[in-house]
Amino acid sequence: MTAKAEIHIPINSDSDIVTARQQGRALAQEMGFNGSDLTVISTAISEIARNIVEHAKSGEIILNAVNSPGTVNSPGKIGLVVIARDKGPGIADIALAMQDGYSTGKGLGVGLPGSRRLMDEFEITSAPGIGTTVTMKKWKR
C-alpha cells in the first residue's frame, strides 16, 4: 500500500457526515478492508461525525492509514485511524457519556459506546469549554 496524506474533512452539517462516511469507506476499501469491516468503519465515522454536528456544531474528521511495526515473530498490521476533533462544549463526565442509552440530546445514546464497540481501539479526551477528540482505529484482519 502506498503512503497517503491525511484526509481532513470539515464537519459542519449533515451533508458533511455523509462525505466523511463516504471518504472513510473509500480509503478503507483502497487499503484492502472489505465486507462487514467497510460497513463497521463507515458506521463508526457517521456516529462520531453526527456527535460533532449535534453537540459542537463544527469540527473535523481526519482519516489516515497507519502501519504497526512488526517483530521477528509477528508481521506488522495495516490500520485506519479516524480522529474526530471539535472545539465544542466538551464532555463533563466521559464515563457517563460512554454508557449505552445516555444522551444529552435527542439521540438514543448509542453513538460513542457503539463506535467504541465497532472499532478495535477507541480513545476519547474532552474538557468542558475546550472540546473533544475521539481517536479510533480499525486493524485489517
Image (cartoon, rainbow, N blue to C red):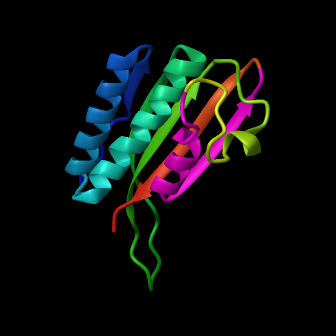
Q: Residue at x 45, y 86 (%)?
A: 73
Is residue 66 placed above or below 141 in the rendered structure?
above
Quadrant where the C terminus sits is bottom left
The quarter of the picture where residue 24 lies is top left
Q: Position of residue 3 (x, y in %)?
A: 30, 46
Task: Say which residue appears at 39% left-offset and 26% top-offset.
Answer: 8
Residue 19, percent from left and from top: 29, 25
Q: Residue at x 27, y 42 (%)?
A: 25
Q: In front here: 89 or 97?
A: 97
| Residue nearer the viewer, 120 or 73 | 120
Left or right: 134 with respect to 69?
Answer: right
13 horizontally vs 2: left or right: right
Q: Is residue 122 magenta?
A: yes
Against 48, residue 119 (above or below) is below
Q: Give the range drawn in magenta.
A: 107-128
Q: Is residue 38 magenta?
A: no
Q: In this view, does 82 lie above or below 49?
A: below
Residue in the picture at 47% in, 52% down: 137
